[in-house]
Image: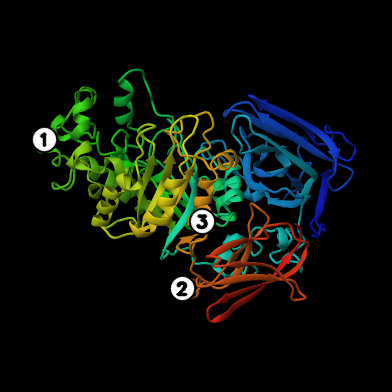
Amino acid sequence: MPGISLAYVAIVTDFDNGNLEYPVACSVFVANATASASAESGGMGSLSLHAKYNLGSPSGYFYLRGSFSPGLFRGRGLFFYARGRGIWDIGAVVLGAKTPAYYRLALLDDWEAYYIPWRDFFYAPAESVRPDLDTNLLVIISFTPQERQGGQMGEIWIDSLGYYYSEGPQPWDYDGDGIPDARDPDADSDRWPQTLEAIAGTDPLDSLSRPTGELGIPDGCYFGLFPILGLTDEQMVFSDITGLKPALVTVFTNGWGDSTSFYHFDRTACDFVARQGAIPVYQWPMRRYPPRVPGGWEWLGNYLLENRFSPESVAAGVYDAELAIFAGEVRDWGLPVFINPFVEYNAGLVQYSGLANFGPDASDVPPKDSMGVFGIWFGDTLIDLCGAVPGDSMCNYYGDPSIPDGPERVADALARIQSVFATAGADKVIWTLQAQPEFVPDSVWGRWNKPAYYYPQGHYPPWHASSAHHGMIKGPNDTVRLTEILSDAYDTLLSISQLPILLIEFAVHTDSATGSMDMSFMFSEDFCDLLKNRYPYVKGFTYANSDAYGMDYRHVGLQIDSARAQAFPGEPAAFSSCIGADPYYYQDPLLPVLGTNEWPYKKETPLTARPNPFSGRTVITCPRDAVQVSVYDPAGRLLWRRERPGREITWPEEPVAPGIYFVVAETRRGIAGILKIVRTGN
């Protein structure tokens, strides 16, 4: 067990008597799955709680619940020991709540102690009933895996479930919150997790030493992940297989709200991303969820003409109050975050596209002969559903007479959103607009749909964004390369302004539901050549790792998982060799530090080390020109060496004994740095 102080921990139940009913009654709930829970040998004492599950389908669900009388848990937060590899949502339910408030964490294979402050539990964005987490009303603690894949199995061990409290700062607890510094995600309570402080090089035990909240633009390109169906444990599997850690992680939300409520900021997901050492890319489509979808072609008109969260109403300030609450939540989070309110804004068939925002009431479409190839296909249907403006009146009903009214309304909505956030003091937001590259050419929807028209004058977002779905997106015998998808959009975005570009949905598609085509050639071409040489303004991408078992691989991104790695080892190898071994790609965000006027990186990156929270191994960041990195024991014996290591390497490759080790990095000029690493376990 980890050697930590338990001076201020109260154990409610340790399961040593084998009873799962008192004082915390533990039970499992499943849907399309099988599961069990029992007290088994191991843990801190003679027995611990062991629960395991087997999901029968992608919609399978497993939920481990401990219920009890109010007042049993108190203190500053929840405490327990656990092991069981995966990403889990820890839930807390109080009387009066409809759903749990959550905290998301990554469990590892070894036993670890976990301290979760009650204040760090947050409700899901769509939950409108959000009572304070009063421990006097607390009645349920739950454990739910993020796993959502048919045929997948998992398990968790829990011991010494209880709570912790504090008696002020201690030598082992700098900020006096009751969490030992060694287990505290934010040991100085400055809102910056230890992982990001280690990346920035600030002092994790000094609240005045922290990053500024800005994000640096790399001279190369950020590597990131987009877990399509949620932050599942496949994110951990991806890291295990490729050895890569994302600098950016996309968080996708369903929309702004439903028919009656406005959704909240997803604090749980963004906290988790930050604790893993990454910056969130927050996909926040300005739409009602779920959209109204009547039968037949009517669905199209209803979806396009949805008046809830329409661009014109947002631009007119109808939702200023709701936006101000959301902006306040983002401000209080306090860390940098990309926010994208218009996901593929130029795709047409979404309410926040310019397509159905023409005319005096923002409900008409352009005339058929101005709608490009789509006008030929179903322009008459759109006109029947929505109505059309005359061809010479596309700019006459709103705003600037030189800009088509539809896109201009969208641009004004973005400007209004930015203004509300600025007023609220949410100044860490990195705004971006995400184009759909296949709809950029004028021939698709028409000249009125140019991306430039969607950019608010005087309020340009600091980053462009685009999707980049390629591969076998048109069929098993038609491979579409990145250049065919991205080049027009890339050149068009840079013609608006030479800003950095973020590829939010960077997806490679294989041939069919079986995924039987090896796509390693495409990964190698993308990462080793095109992103570096053809698209230097692409300063970040998040790879769409889809989690799409049993689904058509043509319509979702190819997932790098254990089965895929076994069948096609060249695919994860392309990630490892082209990204992991190349200093052009950044696996950590660049975070400037308070009190400095320059970014905390130079052409020669200093020698640093940090734990990988997914694997339990150590990630060593090397000088960019390092030719050799070696690891020695205290007696000076060489234990391991890597030539031409690249920017980052993971050590150890095989288990090593706990103890002190020294890392030495050498360049052609000699020793560039010596670093001590303390290993506390395998």
Q: Residue 127 in the image: x percent, y percent?
A: 54, 36
Which amino acid does the dot numbered 3 rest on? Ser
Which amino acid does the dot numbered 2 rest on? Lys
Q: Which residue is mark 3?
A: 577
The CA span between labels 3 and 2 is 21 Å
Would you call the spot at circle 1 few (<14 residues within 10 Å), some (14-19), or many (20 or more)? few
Q: Which residue is mark 1?
A: 391
| Depth order, front residue of 392/469 | 469
Which amino acid does the dot numbered 1 rest on? Gly
Q: How is the image coloured?
A: rainbow
Residue 256 placement, left or right of 410? right
For the point 83% across and 32% down, the residue is 21
Would you call the spot at circle 3 few (<14 residues within 10 Å), some (14-19), or many (20 or more)? some
Residue 372 placement, left or right of 317? left
Q: Which residue is mark 2?
A: 603
Q: Residue 513 in the image: x percent, y percent?
A: 48, 29
- Residue 659 vs 151, above or below: the answer is below
Residue lying furthest left in this view? 392
